[in-house]
Amino acid sequence: KAGVTQTPRYLIKTRGQQVTLSCSPISGHRSVSWYQQTPGQGLQFLFEYFSETQRNKGNFPGRFSGRQFSNSRSEMNVSTLELGDSALYLCASSRDSPGGELFFGEGSRLTVL
Amino acid sequence: DQQVKQNSPSLSVQEGRISILNCDYTNSMFDYFLWYKKYPAEGPTFLISISSIKDKNEDGRFTVFLNKSAKHLSLHIVPSQPGDSAVYFCAASSLNSGGTSYGKLTFGQGTILTVHP
């Protein structure tokens, strides 16, 4: 069974640019969540999508956005990149049931110069 | 406002001994708790979970204890093995708040566990 796939794995951008990250969930999983991991802040929840609708949102500025497609694949976008956006961005999918664990991808490592 | 805290950044244990990782939370709405393990360059992997209606859950070498009155949970690994060396994250969610928080976890900062042979 294929796991959660994130692309690209590594990318380098400069301040002011925008970036789009992609996530393919495990087959049959309809919930996709995004997290940002930084050394200082740990793992922080960005947003969650279910059936193409954003169901939950964390405390991040509007520069961070996302969407989910009908096949449950998801993308997140960060516009007007800042140095502080350098982080590991993790996508997770779940069966969306009580106690359903999250399955994480390997992450996309973004470096902003 | 850090709602889930892991106060020990690191823990060093000898192989074969017990590893105890601790986690405290402040939000009384949390009713489901999980532990994840993370190796470098990989995503976190699920280890074990516990619902707030229980105070203990076991899975092989891993046991999680929950003390709701103290808002404290711990993960015991017995016996510890060198392959257990990784970062361990405690996480919490509010599953009963309308059933819409399955994908939203609040994580602690993580504890680096090193198991020496």
Image (spheres, coloured by chain):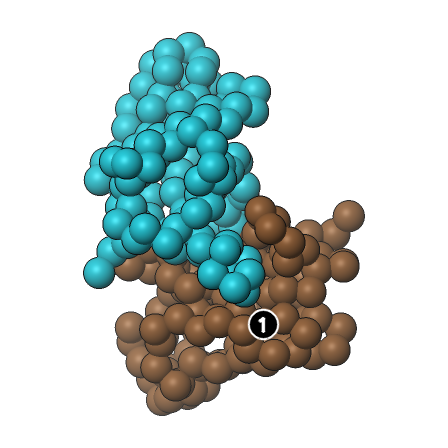
User: Mark 1 = which residue?
Assistant: A49
At 50% from the left edge and 47% from the top edge, which residue is drawn?
A: B44
Residue drawn where x is 60% and y is 65% of the image: A32
Q: Which chain is cyan?
A: B
- Tell me: residue A34, above or below residue B24: below
10 Å neighbourhood of mark 1: few (<14), some, or many (≥20)?
A: many
User: Based on the displayed image, in which of its 4 quarters is residue B52 positioned?
Assistant: top left
Local SS, label 1: strand
Quarter residue A40 falls in: bottom left
Please state which amino acid type lies under the numbered disc 1.
Tyr
Q: Nearer the viewer, residue B45 or A32?
A: A32
The reply to whether residue B108 is visible in this rendering is yes
Residue B89 coordinates in the image, percent (x, y): 39, 43
Q: Is residue B14 left or right of residue A48?
A: left
**Which part of the image, by quadrant, shows the N terminus of chain B?**
bottom left
B90 vs B67, nearest the viewer: B67
Q: Nearer the viewer, residue B101 or A24?
A: B101
Pinpoint residue A94: horizontal percent, then vertical percent.
63, 56
Residue, x 48% and y 71% (percent of image)? A56
Chain A visual colour? brown
Residue A61: x and y, percent? 34, 82
Identify the subunit bearing mark 1.
A
Q: Quadrant of residue A111?
A: bottom left
**Quadrant of the frame with the C terminus of chain B:** top left
Residue A89: x and y, percent? 46, 64
Q: Is residue A21 left or right of residue B35?
A: right
In the shown orientation, is residue A31 left or right of residue A44?
right
A83 lies left or right of A18: left
Residue A91 shows up from this direction: no
Number of numbered discs present? 1
